[in-house]
Image (cartoon, coloured by chain):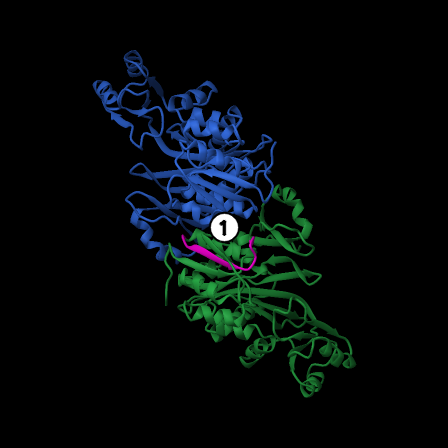
Chain colours: A green, B blue
Amino acid sequence: MSVVPPGGTIGILGGGQLGRMLAMAAARLGLKCAIYAPEKDAPAFQVCDSHVVAPYGDHEALVAFARGVDVVTYEFENVPGDAASVLSGLKSVRPSPRALSVIQDRFQEKSFARERGIATTPFALIDSDASLLAALKSVGTPSVLKTARLGYDGKGQKMVRANDQLAPAWDELNRVPCILEGFVDFTRELSVMAARGQNGQVACFDLVENRHENHILRTTLAPAKASQRVKADAARIATDLLEAFDYVGVMAVEMFETRDGRLLVNEIAPRVHNSGHWTIDGCVVSQFEQHIRAVAGWPLGDPSRHSDAVMTNLLGVEIDAWRAAAAEPNTALHHYGKGEARPGRKMGHVTRLYPLGLRPDG
Amino acid sequence: MSVVPPGGTIGILGGGQLGRMLAMAAARLGLKCAIYAPEKDAPAFQVCDSHVVAPYGDHEALVAFARGVDVVTYEFENVPGDAASVLSGLKSVRPSPRALSVIQDRFQEKSFARERGIATTPFALIDSDASLLAALKSVGTPSVLKTARLGYDGKGQKMVRANDQLAPAWDELNRVPCILEGFVDFTRELSVMAARGQNGQVACFDLVENRHENHILRTTLAPAKASQRVKADAARIATDLLEAFDYVGVMAVEMFETRDGRLLVNEIAPRVHNSGHWTIDGCVVSQFEQHIRAVAGWPLGDPSRHSDAVMTNLLGVEIDAWRAAAAEPNTALHHYGKGEARPGRKMGHVTRLYPLGLRPDG
């Protein structure tokens, strides 16, 4: 255990809205934050004690940053492996670079889960002509071809509707290692935000339901209306993953629920997550504070919710309606302090609260 | 109406825990904060976009500060009148310097309330031998002699147990203008945090009960257990005061409840207040956000509480128990990021949440 007491400094890689909300949560606990980001006007800079503007490949800047903080964490999963090793040579990096490295690779991520008996969507690796043929047999089509590694500028996904489209699709992705994911006949996407402390303590926030539009999260309903069995399964899956990774911090586990009530892990995010934003207003300790507590070696907070909640993202110019949103009853408005409202950009969110058990279906 | 939209900057005089929590609330709304404080390590500096270290008498620094912000507010009532006028010549100062100036003087404050038909504790001005004799007649003893103006380094109060102690007590206070306040046989102290927007909209948080130890607030119980009539009276008093001052921002009104259920105004604070800290965790919009909304010309937030709450201050070395406090269920820990834990210094607080109607008597 290494504890960062009040007055200590949390170093955060990434200065977007997640870094910003992490910094605000740390401040509640009397912890300072230093933010490292390449953009000179990152939103998190407005609320932190100090910041560094430098690319993630700048080893000198990383070393100086690490020297000024007590522990390092991050707001995004595609932290370059090089940066993670430079930093972990100097200070604890939490969650660990090992978890990060597994989760950065879609094939390793899903294999990790499968090897531990956790059901996932069907998948296969494609890194050769032979494995391409094998993937066609095991996963088939229709399916989605995705580059295994993250960080390809948000590109790197191809729909594959018929068997003869797979080879051309892989060519278009420059034959980099890919994963073929089978379609699942799911009824909805659920997710759970779970935390693990340095002492192994695990705390799961309530299971939630997520609704997307154009592949972007639109709304999170908290809690998900689900049977006790499904809720327990989700918490069990998240706990198993946390323990298998010897994880410290908050992890998001996105799952599909099938028509027959099974949960298939779709994606793991080694960080706080958009589908956990409702916890700021619906719980006494938010996902952001929970993550800070974990990485700082504090006891985890109570994850129980005091209110039901519906979180809705404000994308692009939707943020211009901030005034109307601010006037709504029982509603918390969160504005991320970003400049340009580009289409689809996450500019803020609103969380509407309801007494326990009284959340509308949305 | 002059509105500060997201991206704008709120200037805050004072960098203690109130300024810090105001800055964090502003950040939620996408507003930046600039903090002005004389201490070079003010706790609010850790969470704001920019800060100035200068004495409140430094006109040049005040002018530069005002030029960099869109509106000015403050975390403490003894802002020097000079500073308020320099700033209000350049930018809106909210709440207004007029309200500030009345409330800075205990005699003017209580007279202001009395003239509007609001009951106060008995009081009389002492600024001459003649008025001293008159005060003895109208208020009598036992009573408390207080300097009328704030800001005398926290000193300036004398118990007066018998009539012949009054003149010597006034001598000890250097015969500055004072107010003699009669003892009231009250059962408890209540307070209400109320806000008024630029459009005249008023929103009151629930009435709370405050318990003190050694003249320092120890615990706030939210809501106060009180009759509907007492609750309505308190909201009426706060609303009347807000309107009489043409006030913009959050105001705290402390009242004594007498044995026969009357409310007597004891003190008004033209700012966010320790007895409103519970709103951070008990309401969807806190007193801090409410204040920022008002001074920025935004709609006020919904002041209804989603949970009952008990707020307890952590004074001096009590903050050393932060780890135990962090581990308690249903509890929010707030650490102000201050350095030295001097005796009696407000270092943080905890808020324990309970479902509506289930708050223990504490």
Tell me what residue is drawn at x 45 percent, y 48 percent.
B358
Label 1 Cα crowd, 10 Å radius (few <14 / some 14-19 / many 20+): many
Please determine whether, in this image, residue A115 is positioned above or below residue B281. Answer: below
Q: Residue A358: horizontal and vertical position, in percent?
A: 60, 52
Q: Residue B178: horizontal and vertical position, in percent?
A: 32, 21
Tell me what residue is drawn at x 48 percent, y 76 percent.
A244
Tell me what residue is drawn at x 44 percent, y 24 percent.
B102
- The image quarter in which residue A153 lies: bottom right
Check the image and name the residue furthest to the top: B130
Q: Would you say residue B251 is visible in this rendering?
A: no
Please determine whether, in this image, residue A68 is positioned above or below residue B10. Answer: below
Q: Determine whether the residue tagged by mark 1 lies in a helix, strand or loop.
A: helix
Does the magenta-highlighted stretch encompass residue A33?
yes
Quadrant position of the C terminus of chain A in the picture: bottom right
Q: Would you say residue A9 is visible in this rendering?
A: yes
Nearest to the observer: residue A225 or residue A82 = A82
Does the magenta-highlighted stretch encompass residue A119?
no
Quadrant position of the N terminus of chain A in the picture: bottom left
Please determine whether, in this image, residue A294 is positioned above or below residue A351. Answer: below
Q: What subunit carries mark 1? A: A
Q: Which residue is mark 1?
A: A47
Q: Residue A241: horizontal and vertical position, in percent?
A: 51, 73
Does B282 sit left or right of B78 as displayed? right
Q: Which residues are magenta?
A: A30-42
Under mark 1, the amino acid is: Val
